[in-house]
Image (spheres, rainbow, N blue to C red):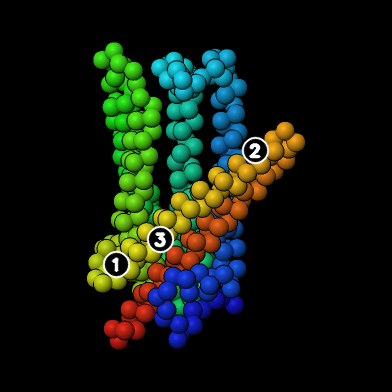
Amino acid sequence: MAETLPKDRVTQSFVGTLQWCWKRPLLTALEVLWRWVYGVPALLLLWHEGTRILQTTPLDDAALKQMTLLDPVKASLTLAKAMLALMPPLLAVAVWLVPLLVVTWVIVSSLGRTVVLRRVDSRLHVRPVTLMVLQVIRLAAMSTSFAVWFWCLQEAAKIAVTGPIAQGAEPSMVLYFALAIIATLGLFVLWALVSWGFSVAPLLAMLHGWGVGRSLASSFRLGGLKIKLVEINLVMGIVKIALIVLAMVFSASPLPFETVATQEFLTYWWAGVTVLYFVASDYFHVARLVAYLELWRATAVESGGGI
């Protein structure tokens, strides 16, 4: 039987939403299931193709192993040489692999998200095609953000590395990484501020049975509700950063005992940390969707309207 949000529950507390989701682990299990139904085969396919390319492409393994940050110029030249060798086979595979992964993700994520949201509230409309189109739009926006991020990294390299080298000065890797971190965090916060609309649009489509255009347009015109949605998105951004930091800390925790820890133990440990990270991330994804839904319900009740 599908989970239904209690009618008298209109709390706008994100902590309350987390507790509500925690008491319903099936929601997280469904989220994990549909993501891993896509993710595991995708990773295996990427591993297979990547291994095949590395085995068939001649690389200077000795030079790659000798790379060091103490000699960034030599390291960059080594990487550039390796990329020149790898790019032709990578592009040949990307021609068919990237569209396959994107199309599969759009289909699986739309169906999976429909199942999860219907489990949260069985009154929601089933709009898989609309969700697929909205997912394509979201992927396009995300790809644009990655392109901007890559451009920022290139500009940082010009300022801190290639620019000084061209002028006969020493490159500054510290400055490069500082600029890269600032750009990454800045774009991360910016995406958290503007991307909430892409997450709300599928919810509006299922709430009202709307099409793509109306759902997307309405998701960015929510009046006072917008501030609360942005706040939740920022909180989720902070949570994601915290999860990454925790995963890094737990991954590094066995290193002081590397003299007694076997490589097999470290492999299992890192695999376990990775799995826990993804499960926790999926849990917070579900909590965010439920929080969006609760906020919308609460606003509708306060305004005297319905869904």
* Residue 94 pos. (x, y %): 46, 33
**If the image is split into quadrants, where does the N terminus sit?**
bottom right
Q: Amino acid at mark 2?
A: Leu
* Residue 149 pos. (x, y %): 34, 39
The residue that appears at 29% across and 13% down in the rendered structure is: 168
Horizontally, is 6 left or right of 224 in the view? right
Between discs 2 and 3, the one toward the N terminus: 3
For the residues labelled 2 and 3, the Cα–Cα distance comes to 31 Å
The residue under label 2 is 255
Q: Secondary structure at mark 1?
A: helix
In this orientation, which residue lies closer to the viewer: 129 or 198?
Answer: 198
**If the image is split into quadrants, where does the C terminus sit?**
bottom left
Mark 1: few/some/many CA within 10 Å (<14, 14-19, 20+): few
Q: Is residue 129 above or below residue 48?
A: below
Between discs 1 and 3, the one toward the N terminus: 1
Any mark on residue 42, and which? Answer: none
Between discs 1 and 2, the one toward the N terminus: 1
The residue under label 3 is 235
The residue under label 1 is 227
Mark 3: few/some/many CA within 10 Å (<14, 14-19, 20+): some
Q: Amino acid at mark 1?
A: Ile
Q: Is residue 274 above or below residue 9?
A: above
Mark 2: few/some/many CA within 10 Å (<14, 14-19, 20+): few
Q: Amino acid at mark 3?
A: Val
The residue that appears at 28% across and 27% down in the rendered structure is: 159
Quadrant in the picture for residue 95: top left
